[in-house]
Amino acid sequence: MANRRQVLATSAKVASLMLATGLFGSHALASGPAAGKGAFDAKTLADLTKALGLGAPTESKDVTITAPDIAENGAVVPLGAATTVAGVKQVMLLVEKNPSVLAALFNVSPEIEPAFKARVKMGQSSNVIAVVVTGDNKVLFAQKEVKVTLGGCGG
C-alpha cells in the first residue's frame, strides 16, 4: 500500500503530464491568458470589463448567484454563480468592496456546465456580483448584498 508521500508525488507527476499534454487546457488556469492582463488588479466592475475588453454589463434573470444573507465568518464566505444562458465563455465572482474586485474567474467550455462555487474572503459587508460572459461577448450579471459580521455582532 502506498503511503501519503508516494500518492502525492504520483499525483503531481500526473498533473504536470496532463498540463504538458494539454489535457487540462486553459480551463484549469484561472489567472492564465483568458483572465486578461490586469483583470485581478481591477478595483471596479467597469475596470474589470475594460481590462477584459468587454462591453457594458446588463443585469439578467438568467444569471443566479448563491450567497448567504449574513456571513458569520468573513474569512470563508461560500459563493456560487450559475446561468441558463447558452454559449457561456466565462463566469466570474466579484466582491465589490474587496481590494481586488475579482474574486474568481472560471473559463467555460461547451462540455462544462456553467455553475461554480467558491469560498472567498470578505473584509466587510459588500455587494457580491456574478458575471457571465457569452461567446458573443455579451456581459450579464446578478448581484446580492452580503453582510459580514465580526464574531456574530452585526456589521
Image (cartoon, grey):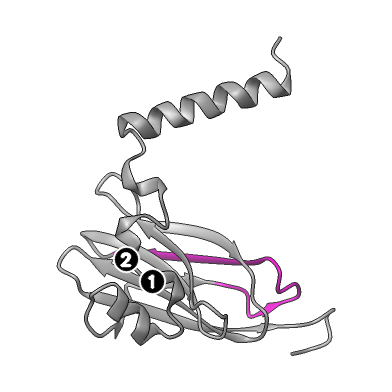
Q: State the residue position of label 2.
A: 36
Under circle 1, the secondary element is helix
Q: Please tell me how crowded label 1 is: few (under 14), some (14-19), or many (20+) other residues with Cα within 10 Å.
A: many
Is residue 83 something that shows in the picture? no
Residue 64 in the image, given as x and y percentages of width and height: 42, 71
**Which residue is nearer to you in this view: 49 or 111?**
49
Drawn side of residue 89 relative to residue 41, left or right: left
- Residue 57's place in the image compared with 108, above or below, is below
Under circle 2, the secondary element is loop
Q: State the residue position of label 1.
A: 39
CA distance for labels 1 and 2: 5 Å
Residue at the extreme top: 1
Residue segment shown in magenta: 67-84
Residue 47 in the image, given as x and y percentages of width and height: 36, 84
**Which residue is nearer to you in this view: 142 or 61?**
142
Q: Say which residue appears at 40% left-offset and 79% top-offset.
A: 142
- Residue 123's place in the image compared with 85, above or below, is below
Residue 151 in the image, given as x and y percentages of width and height: 85, 79
